[in-house]
Amino acid sequence: MASTQDIIARSATTTTSSSIRQVDEVAKLIDTTLCIGCKACQVACSEWNDLRDEVGSNVGVYDNPNDLTADSWTVMRFEEHQTTEDDLEWLIRKDGCMHCEDPGCLKACPSPGAIIKHANGIVDFNQDKCIGCGYCITGCPFDVPRISEKDKKAYKCTLCSDRVAVGLEPACVKTCPTGAIVFGTKEDMKEHANWRIADLNRRGYENAGLYDPLGVGGTHVMYVLHHADKPEMYSGLPKNPTISPFVGAWKGVTKPLAMLAMAATAMAGFFHYIRIGPNRVEDDTHTQGTSAQVQHFDPSESRDPSQGE
Amino acid sequence: MNSDKNQYLQRYNANERTNHWAVALLFILAGLSGLALFHPALFWLSNLFGGGTWTRILHPFIGVAMFILFAVLALRFVGRNRFKAHDREWLSKWRKVINNQEDDVPAVGKYNGGQKVLFWVLIISMIMLLLSGIVIWREYFSGFFAIDIIRLASLLHAFFAFVLISSIIVHVYAAIWVKGSIGAMTSGKVSQSWARKHHRLWYDEMRKKER
């Protein structure tokens, strides 16, 4: 199981990382239709990861804390969706890192190895190498990473990579009382989701479906949604998340091209000097020339400079 | 007039030279620390600043200092950098200029068309770097901006840094290529013959003042 910790992608690294071992990809499946919003997962996350967020204040909704922070890596987002005049539907989504197959944070990070992707699909931050620039926030399509005010390092859900490495499920999965969060290989989780979706379809949720967005290559945290056709209903879950084209252009092919262009500019100068040579003021060169030949003064030569004028 | 060979013209005074070199040194520091974050191949440059985290902390402060001193320098030089008809003509003859065949290249003032283009490219780049830099300065300012603005600013910051660095490479090479130029920014003086050859209108103006 140790090979699940193989690092197959590494931030700010242009060569291929170790990738010969074949490892099953893992996934956490969050079934929003079974979630009761008890926040046990939030507590388990704080417990396992030894995080104690500051006690905040209630802002009039059930979300507590109100947003993800460097000390709260997962948070339940509550959305009251009015279905008819006198009925509403409570859409509760456990928010946190989606562990993208193509992670925008990893693409944006400038510090080699500060963000890594394991062979099993887990995306992890290495705070020891984090420089605190916040580019991961810029790159993330899901607004997940947070910079800690204590140490200016970026933090997010690790998918309990330390637990998964020794064959355990993430802490949130272990604690969920309704079985709304399950964990296993990505294939198994898709199968599990299919069974859940079929059940939901039978119960009248014809748009129930799996959220595993292809725009980021799929994710290693997936949702079963009653309204998979409208993921935005779940506190703004993006319908088709992708790495922003600005980030793509910023971190993509333009970087090596810009490096090449700067080197080419310097080289153009060098070869211009070699081929065409310096632009000298003639009077100055004559001045230098005569001073070198002071020993062999010839009166006839002294007329040369004046001829040029 | 014939004894002018050894006489020099004052091109930059001590304040202008100090200002120029302060900006130049800050540019080197901002450039090296910025390049460290620009491409993985250059991340090792962060060691010059005490590691990645120190590079991240220092770079924006260096950049702001560079901008302020550049702004002072630009105000000193802006009057001499307005485009005139002869600058356009000069620029159209750029092929002759770079081949050291300047016989029918028009006379120019204190700055030629190329120097003026550089001046305005630097102005635009510096302003864009400052504005985009503030947006992506995570510690103090990024929280005030929408994520897409931050993303666009990241791209623009890298782009204008590229433009600035490329322009300065050209600027430095031009100083090496055109002999007699570097003294203008070290001792402040250029030879009369240099001024007559490269900046005839400025030379005439300076001679008129002398009389």
Image (cartoon, coloured by chain):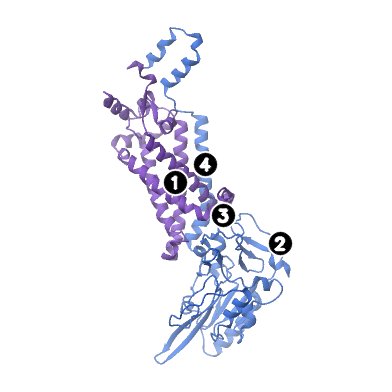
Chain colours: A blue, B purple
Q: What quarter of the picture does the N terminus of chain A occupy?
A: bottom right
- At label 3, which amino acid type do we have? Gly
SS assignment at label 2? loop
- The residues tagged by marks 4 and 3 sit, at their Cα atoms, a distance apart of 27 Å
Q: Give left or right: position of A284 versus A48.
A: left
Residue at mark 3 shares a chain with residue at mark 2? no
Residue at mark 1 shares a chain with residue at mark 4? no
- Residue drawn 45% across and 84% down? A80
Q: Which mark is residue B52?
A: 3
- The residues tagged by marks 1 and 2 sit, at their Cα atoms, a distance apart of 42 Å
Report if the CB atoms under discs 1 and 4 are less than 8 Å apart.
no
Report if the CB atoms under discs 1 and 3 are less than 8 Å apart.
no
- At label 1, which amino acid type do we have? Leu
Question: Is residue A234 or residue B144 the one in the foreground?
Answer: B144
Question: Dot 2: few (<14), some (14–19), or many (≥20) neighbours within 10 Å?
Answer: few
Give the residue pinned by disc 1.
B164
Give the residue pinned by disc 2.
A20
- The residues tagged by marks 4 and 2 sit, at their Cα atoms, a distance apart of 37 Å
- The residues tagged by marks 3 and 2 sit, at their Cα atoms, a distance apart of 31 Å
Give the residue pinned by disc 4.
A264
- Chain letter of mark 4 equals A
- Whether residue A270 is visible here, answered yes or no, is yes
Badge 4 or badge 2: first in the primary sequence: 2
Query: Residue B62 in the image: x percent, y percent?
Result: 46, 50
Mark 3 vs mark 2, foreground winner is 3
